[in-house]
Image (cartoon, grey):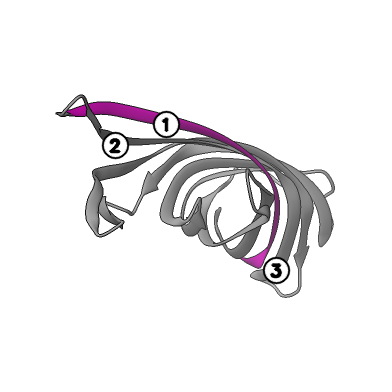
Amino acid sequence: GYYNISSLGLALGSREYSGLSVSPGIYTLNGCKFNKHLMAGVGVGLEWLNESGKMPIFLDARYRILQGNVSPFVGVMAGYNVSLQGKENRQYYDIWYDPGRHDKGGVTAGIQFGFLANVGEHIGLTGSAGYRYQHLTTSYNDYWWNNGEYNILPVIERTDMHRVTLSFGLLFE
């Protein structure tokens, strides 16, 4: 049968220069329960990651270990994180610097361990902890003066993020 999981989450990791990074998110997952153990679906969310908004679109599969009202589960997810940030202009020392910076998003994948607890006939609670990988790509032009000549160098930055995830949500069946 059909199910929906609506959840809030946090992704915890480190930043290169400023210590701990906490990225909040909200997600909804719609899918099909194939039997009492296996469930799979498609999800979408909104999250703040790497100082900009992202919209993850992903496939999710979960395996309920027990058949009772409360069961631990193991789950995997994979998808693409669409950037919600278009091109941006940054001002640097009163001149326009870095016009055309574009965050392109990137692939994401993860694993989680958690619980599913039915509290009513068609409603339950879920919580999990896990690991999530995120690859992000950003492109921009680097401008500089060289011997009286204005030079432009296209730059592509690739960032690989490794995060611990925590989530809590409602299960509708």
Considering every residue shown, the one lying at the far front of the view is: 147
Q: Position of residue 153 (x, y in %)?
A: 26, 26
Give the side of residue 107 with respect to residue 82, left or right.
Answer: right
Looking at the rendered structure, the kind of residue marked 2 is Tyr
**In percent of the image, x 74 and y 55: which residue is there?**
128
Looking at the rendered structure, the kind of residue marked 1 is Glu
**In percent of the image, x 42 and y 53: which residue is there?**
54
Of the residues tagged 3 and 2, which is closer to the observer? 2
Q: Position of residue 28 (x, y in %)?
A: 50, 60
Q: Position of residue 86 (x, y in %)?
A: 26, 51
Residue range in magenta is: 150-173
Q: Which mark is residue 157?
A: 1
Q: Circle 3 sits on which residue? A: 124
Disc nearer the start of the sequence (3/1): 3
Q: Which mark is residue 140?
A: 2
- In the structure shown, which secondary structural element does the residue marked by tag 3 occupy? strand
* Up/down of 39 relative to 172, above or below: above
Mark 2 and mark 1 residues within 8 Å of each other at the beta carbon: yes
Q: Is residue 76 visible?
A: no
Looking at the rendered structure, the kind of residue marked 3 is Gly
Give the side of residue 107 with respect to residue 171, left or right.
Answer: left
Q: Main secondary structure of the magenta part?
A: strand
Mark 3 and mark 2 residues within 8 Å of each other at the beta carbon: no
**Crowding at label 1, few (<14), some or many (≥20) Cα neighbours within 10 Å?**
few
**In percent of the image, x 78 and y 52: which residue is there?**
114
Q: Is 172 covered by the magenta stretch?
A: yes
- In the structure shown, which secondary structural element does the residue marked by tag 1 occupy? strand
**Crowding at label 2, few (<14), some or many (≥20) Cα neighbours within 10 Å?**
some
Q: Is 70 covered by the magenta stretch?
A: no
Residue in the foreground of this view, choosing between 31 and 154 = 154
Give the side of residue 96 with respect to residue 116, left or right.
Answer: left
